[in-house]
Image (spheres, rainbow, N blue to C red):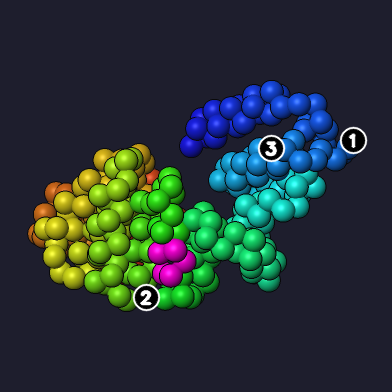
Amino acid sequence: MIRMFARSLLVVIAFVATLPASAQMGDIGQPSGRDGRSRAKIHTELASLYFQAGNPSVALDEVRIALDADSSFYQAYSVRALVYASLKENAKAEEDFRRALSMGPNDPEVNNNYGWYLCDTGRERQSIPYFLNALKDPLYETPGRAYTNAGSCAFKAGDLDSAQKYLLQAVALSRDGAAPARLQLARLFYQRGNFDEAKIYLTDAMKAMEPPPADALWLGIRLERKLGNRAAESAYSAQLRSRYPTSAEYQEFLKGKFE
């Protein structure tokens, strides 16, 4: 993840260096027109990268630079809303999401981001239309992500049929193996008592996860326990103990709360 962030950051910085001087001026002057839009786009991308790398303060600085360059670049408001949401500043996040949606109501990324925010703040059913609106754009580059989010939020809302439909669409459309969608499908089939199907999706998801997250290992323990595979259950248990000894999942394991 760190290497990927560093490579992406270098690409963006290199591109900034190719912009006209007026688009790189920072606090010295205000670029206008196309230069301002280019600068806003670059700094919004930087903000997104810093946010993904866990540096929200720098991300907010980059958004400020983006909006100073072009206050109409609504994608910057959407990114800032995500940062505010991660900081639990929900009033600010709502304001920025509303502004982004008013300026770009059909933008797929803005709709996807707002949908995820709604889902993360306990409004799972309200989130689904925003993911589906994102999917209406035939040029949307990551439809698999929106389907994964729609499936995850439908699952969280207890609508297992819709969740399964969306997650299977995510698997079909994603080019990267769709590990998050496969893991969610494993959880869904486990909940439905279809343990063999759950194992297929969990095994596929694990292949793309290194190291596997604690929740995936915990699901593996419970799944293999249901299937009576003691050796596989012990192998997952050993991984959970060695990798995540302070995790909530390991505490549940120690308490024997397998259901």
Describe the element under mark 3 as helix, strand or loop: helix
Q: Nearer the viewer, residue 175 or 136?
A: 136
Which of label 1 and label 2 is nearer to you? 1
Which mark is drawn over residue 197? none
Magenta span: chief secondary structure:
helix
Q: Magenta segment range?
A: 128-133
Q: Position of residue 57 (x, y in %)?
A: 71, 49
Q: Identify the amino acid type marked 1.
A: Ile
State yes or no: discs 1 and 2 in contact (Cβ < 8 Å): no
Up/down of 19 relative to 168, above or below: above
Which of label 3 and label 2 is nearer to you? 3
Q: Answer whether residue 106 is visible to the viewer in this image.
A: yes
Question: Would you name the residue on which mark 3 appears?
Answer: 38
Q: CA distance from mark 1 to mark 2?
A: 50 Å
Residue at point 62% right, 52% down?
75
Dot 2 crowding, Cα within 10 Å, few <14, some 14–19, many 20+ = some
Q: Position of residue 257 (x, y in %)?
A: 29, 70
